[in-house]
Image (cartoon, grey):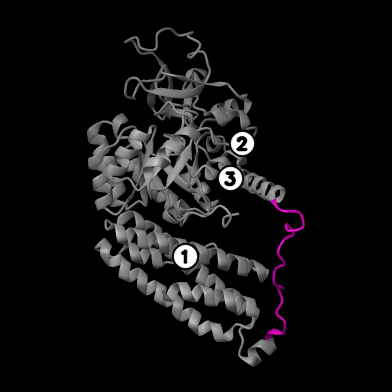
Amino acid sequence: MSAVFHTAACDILGCDLPVVLAGMGGVARAELVAAVSEAGGYGFLGMVRESPRFIRKQIHEVRAATGRDFGVTLIPAATPPDLFREELQVCIEERVHSVCLFWGVDRETIARLRASGILVVCQIGTAAEASAAIRAGAQMLIAQGVEAGGHVRGETARSVLLKETLAVSGDVPVLAAGGVATGADLLAALDDGASGVVLGTALLATKESFAHDYHKRRIVEASPGDTLRTQDFHINWPRGAFVRVLGNSVTQGAHGDPFRPEREIIGEDFGRSLYRFSTDSPLRTTSGSLEQMALYAGTGAGSIADIPSAASRIDKIVGDALALRTAAQHVAAVPGENAPAELASPSCSAAAADDAYMGFLPRDEVVSLLNLLLEAERAGARAAARLALDLADPASKAEMKALHADETFCCRLLLEEIAALGATPSPRIGDFYDKLMGVEPIEDRVPFLAKGQRWVARKLHEALPKIRDDRLHARLVEMLALHEV
């Protein structure tokens, strides 16, 4: 499945699937982020108004649970300035892979993150905000449609905003957010040009989510149309902001004017008082009048009927999307021409011992070689995608974009050949990417990347005389030609 839906965002984020966990404050903590990453997606820790000590602890917990990359979501507009500076410093000191910023374009913060080598992702609600974020240096965008749960920046439907954002984004990849909960939603976003999707509500209602069980059950019980946009939940957030929630006694007006100056405590979370009309949602550690709290949910809540593991949720969404695409391709195929291509036999045409005697690699060694090359090509694709964002020279950016296309093609080629041998592809990304990111200045990474290309070419030159299968030999020759260029 990862090969079918592979996108530029996958290479930049280092994930197998174009599925990203929204950095939901309170909800997206280490357990959920690690689960999403291990399932092949990419996770953001939701560290809104959290202490620097807690953020550092969460980063360490994710790293202890997975070797995959992940990011941290911060919101300058909803955080006291001194606290935000401390949050940002922790992310820089810990060298997190990425930081996602939301609710306005903070040029100074973007510049500081870029200077620290941290990938900058900006979530936007309008095409104008997208343009401003790109001018400020954002390297990836999340186009958040009005269907999204929680704090909603814009007023435009996801599909419309995605189209408007793609019109101004250039080479910057765009993820689609808002109401994504099914395989059909994922497929529609990818077909509309998104480089991936961001899941909020769909992953809030999972076992690893830090949301309270009451919140999860309310999502499962929701029907299509049960969510609404409101400003009722506003304490701790800039004035005039909308949120999308499930209806409750607060949204029904049972507790009076949300903007009156008096504040009433309705709950507690880890020793902290929670007020009615605040933006706090109920977490595992929350007690009190849960029904009156902000029960964030996007329009996709009506499609959620259970509380599985995060991996199961992602597998279901991606699997359904694959089934839908396969069905569509089957319908579109010309009769008589839609029979599946015959794969090469998993077994060699001669015994392994005979292959060795003739100087050819036995099957197991061929598989090992192809997996080694696959890991290298994944690293190369990711490196080229990142350099296409980081380099300033237009000609160099175009060169890296073309190289990324070649590396992605080689990844698909290798996956197909490993499958033809009846073997399992390696899930790893080669360590070349991490080595490249340690090279300074950025311009010196291009010749370093060229060294990686030469290494692959050398491996292919060494291996080709030992490949017995004519079809595989021809495909590796094709791959060699790309790397020699």
Task: Return the mark for residue 382.
Answer: none
Residue named by callout 2: 307
In front: mark 2 or mark 1? 1
Which residue ends up furthest to the bottom in the rendered image?
Answer: 357
Residue 215: quarter of image: top right
Amino acid at the residue labelled 2: Ile
- Judged from the image, the secondary structure of the residue bearing numbered disc 3 is helix
Total marks in image: 3
Q: Are marks 3 and 1 in contact (CB under 8 Å)?
A: no
Taking the spot 35% from the left edge, 38% from the top edge, the residue there is: 130
Amino acid at the residue labelled 1: Glu
Residue 312: quarter of image: top right
Residue 422, can we see it? yes
State the image coordinates of residue 406 (x, y, percent, origin top left).
47, 65
State the image coordinates of residue 47 (x, y, percent, origin top left).
37, 38
As displayed, is residue 65 above or below residue 83?
A: below
Residue named by callout 3: 314
Task: Return the mark for residue 407.
Answer: 1
